[in-house]
């Protein structure tokens, strides 16, 4: 989906068109009625297709919701059984000197 080029710059009409297509793809009843909407990681890039944007299949959404349930279960388990470890992980995630987008378990064995 080219949105311009190095010679002429951004194509504003193309950007508006893409924005409208994206909005129409995410404004669907499945997402509006989905309990995981605030945790869903399906962004515009993941929905891109050569002709616009496509929504995930029902089976893919079932997987995303299951993965969200798993993350909630991990959080509840840690908060009930290992609150100290949960605090260490939170501190680690909020420390820009260490956290680079992935959790290195070796950081917790020191
Ligand atoms: S899991 Fe599927 S239905 Fe739910 S918000 Fe994400 S894309 Fe929409």
Image (cartoon, rainbow, N blue to C red):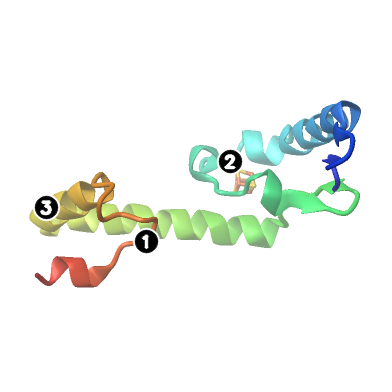
Quarter the C terminus occupies = bottom left
First of labels 3, 2 by sequence position? 2
Q: Residue at x 39, y 56 (%)?
A: 101
> Is the C-beta of the residue carrying label 2 under 8 Å from the nearest atom of ligand 1?
yes
Q: Is residue 42 left or right of residue 50?
A: left
Spot occupied by residue 5 in the image (x, y as percentages of width and height)? 86, 42
Which residue carries the number 1 mark?
Answer: 102
Front one among 46 and 60? 46
Q: Is residue 25 left or right of residue 76?
A: right
Confirm or deny contact between disc 3 and disc 1 (CB under 8 A): no
Q: Residue at x 69, y 44 (%)?
A: 44
Which residue carries the number 2 mark?
Answer: 34
Q: Is residue 71 left or right of residue 52?
A: left
Circle number at residue 83? 3
Tell me which corner region of the image, top left, top right, bottom left or bottom right, holds residue 50: bottom right
Q: Residue at x 30, y 54 (%)?
A: 99
Tell me which corner region of the image, top left, top right, bottom left or bottom right, holds residue 71: bottom left
Separation (CA) of disc 3 from disc 2: 30 Å
Spot occupied by residue 94 in the image (x, y as percentages of width and height)? 25, 44
Front one among 99 and 25? 99
Closer to the observer: label 1 or label 2? Answer: 1
Q: Residues within 10 Å of mark 1 (few under 14, many from 20)?
A: few
Vertical order, 5 against 71 (above or below): above
First of labels 1, 2 by sequence position? 2
Separation (CA) of disc 1 from disc 2: 27 Å
Q: Residues within 10 Å of mark 3 (few under 14, many from 20)?
A: some
Confirm or deny contact between disc 3 and disc 2 (CB under 8 A): no
């Amino acid at each position: 989906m080219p949105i311009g080029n190095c010679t002429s710059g951004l194509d504003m009409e193309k950007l508006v068109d893409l924005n409208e297509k994206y909005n129409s793809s995410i404004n669907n009843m499945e997402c509006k009625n989905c309990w995981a909407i605030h945790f869903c990681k399906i962004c515009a890039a993941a929905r891109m297709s050569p002709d616009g944007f496509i929504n995930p299949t029902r089976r893919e959404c079932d997987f995303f919701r299951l993965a969200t349930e798993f993350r909630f279960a991990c959080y509840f388990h840690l908060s009930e059984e290992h609150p100290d470890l949960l605090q260490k992980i939170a501190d680690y995630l909020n420390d820009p000197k260490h956290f680079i987008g992935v959790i290195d378990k070796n950081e917790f064995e020191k």
